[in-house]
Image (cartoon, rainbow, N blue to C red):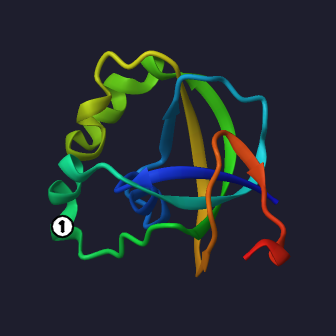
């Protein structure tokens, strides 16, 4: 199955339903199910902003499954998203690139594994 590695706190915000778009500099034509991998890289400057949510910020593990149903220009959705939740999307202002819309998110039992750049394939025997 395809996997996308995402830094914390963003991976958990997606996994727990607080964030429905993932921003990237590159476009994807992929539509379908994928696994969300919380990378070992953590954006420390953003972690404190979300402590009050009392969610887990696992690292180095696959933490959820979702479905990408669209990829749009980030500038086309940024104002709407900032109005919807400025805490989550406020740093997305003037973002160049693309926004992958993610829906049907389900938490999974964390699977420790190393991540990779871009979409990558996960095979159970890798863990």
Quick one: 6 or 87, which is closer to the camera?
6
Give the vertical position of 31 relative to 63 (above or below). Answer: above
Quick one: 73 or 47, which is closer to the camera?
47
Coordinates of residue 38 in the picture (x, y in percent) = 50, 61
Q: Give the image quarter of residue 123.
A: bottom right
Determine whether the residue tagged by mark 1 lies in a helix, strand or loop: helix
Residue 8 vs residue 109: left or right?
left
Coordinates of residue 31 in the picture (x, y in percent) = 78, 41
Residue 127 vs residue 103: left or right?
right
Residue appearing at x 26%, y 44% in the figure: 85
Coordinates of residue 19 in the picture (x, y in percent) = 41, 51
- Crowd class of label 1 (few under 14; some 14 to 19; many from 20; radius 10 Å): few
Give the vertical position of 76 relative to 71 (above or below). Answer: above
Coordinates of residue 89 in the picture (x, y in percent) = 30, 38
Picture quarter with the N terminus: bottom right
Quick one: 117 or 16, which is closer to the camera?
117
Picture quarter with the C terminus: bottom right
Give the vertical position of 42 relative to 59 (above or below). Answer: above
Residue appearing at x 42%, y 72% in the figure: 58
Residue 93 vs residue 33: left or right?
left
Q: How many marks?
A: 1
Disc 1 target residue: 51
Residue appearing at x 16%, y 54% in the figure: 49
Residue appearing at x 21%, y 60% in the figure: 50
Give the vertical position of 16 relative to 42 (above or below). Answer: below
């Amino acid at each position: 199955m395809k996997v996308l590695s995402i830094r914390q706190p963003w991976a958990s915000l997606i996994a727990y339903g607080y964030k429905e778009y993932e921003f990237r500099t590159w476009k994807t034509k992929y539509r379908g199910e994928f696994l969300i991998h919380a990378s070992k890289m953590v954006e420390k400057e953003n972690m404190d902003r979300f402590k009050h949510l009392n969610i887990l910020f696992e690292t180095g593990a696959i933490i959820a499954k979702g479905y990408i149903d669209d990829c749009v220009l980030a500038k086309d959705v940024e104002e709407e998203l900032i109005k919807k939740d400025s805490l989550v999307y406020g740093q997305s202002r003037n973002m160049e690139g693309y926004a992958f819309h993610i829906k049907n998110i389900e938490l999974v039992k964390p699977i420790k594994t190393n991540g990779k750049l871009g979409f990558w394939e996960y095979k159970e025997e890798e863990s």
